[in-house]
Image (spheres, helix red, strand yellow):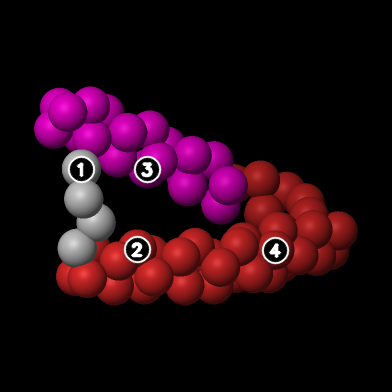
């Protein structure tokens, strides 16, 4: 498959997004460390809610694919 100028442009933008997300994921993990350090019980409750919602999203994605 030949890469067109447009597809190269998309790949460049995707790479930029990937690099930003890498940095942002580090920031999220730092926030999580601080939260567990200062309020582990409250943080665990929030993380549980996030986990539950992530499972719902994963189920919906499976329906799409």
Residue that appears at 86% across and 58% down: 37
Of the residues under marks 3 and 1, which one precedes in the sequence?
Answer: 1
Q: Which mark is residue 26?
A: 4
Residue 15 position in % (x across, y down): 46, 65
Residue that appears at 38% across and 33% down: 55
Q: Mark 2 points at which residue?
A: 11
Residue 14 position in % (x across, y down): 38, 64
Of the residues under marks 1 and 2, which one precedes in the sequence?
Answer: 1
Separation of marks 4 and 3 at Cα, in angstroms: 21 Å
Q: Name the residue under label 1.
A: 1
Q: Are marks 2 and 4 in contact (CB under 8 Å)?
A: no
Few, some or many C-alpha atoms within 10 Å of disc 3 (few <14, some 14-19, many ≥20)? few
Under tag 2, what secondary structure? helix
Separation of marks 3 and 1 at Cα, in angstroms: 38 Å
Of the residues under marks 3 and 2, which one precedes in the sequence?
Answer: 2
Few, some or many C-alpha atoms within 10 Å of disc 1 (few <14, some 14-19, many ≥20)? few
> Does 20 sit left or right of 33 as displayed?
left
Q: Which of 3 and 9 is in front in this view?
A: 3
Q: Which of marks 3 and 2 is in front?
A: 2
Residue that appears at 76% across and 65% down: 30
Q: Label the magenta part by its dominant secondary structure.
A: helix
Q: Nearer the viewer, mark 4 or mark 1?
A: 1
Q: Give the range drawn in magenta.
A: 46-65
């Amino acid at each position: 498959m030949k890469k067109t100028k447009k597809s190269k442009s998309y790949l460049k933008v995707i790479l930029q997004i990937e690099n930003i997300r890498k940095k942002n994921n580090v920031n999220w993990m730092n926030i999580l460390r601080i939260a567990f350090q200062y309020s582990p019980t409250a943080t665990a409750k929030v993380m549980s809610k996030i986990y539950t919602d992530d499972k719902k999203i994963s189920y919906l994605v499976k329906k799409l694919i």
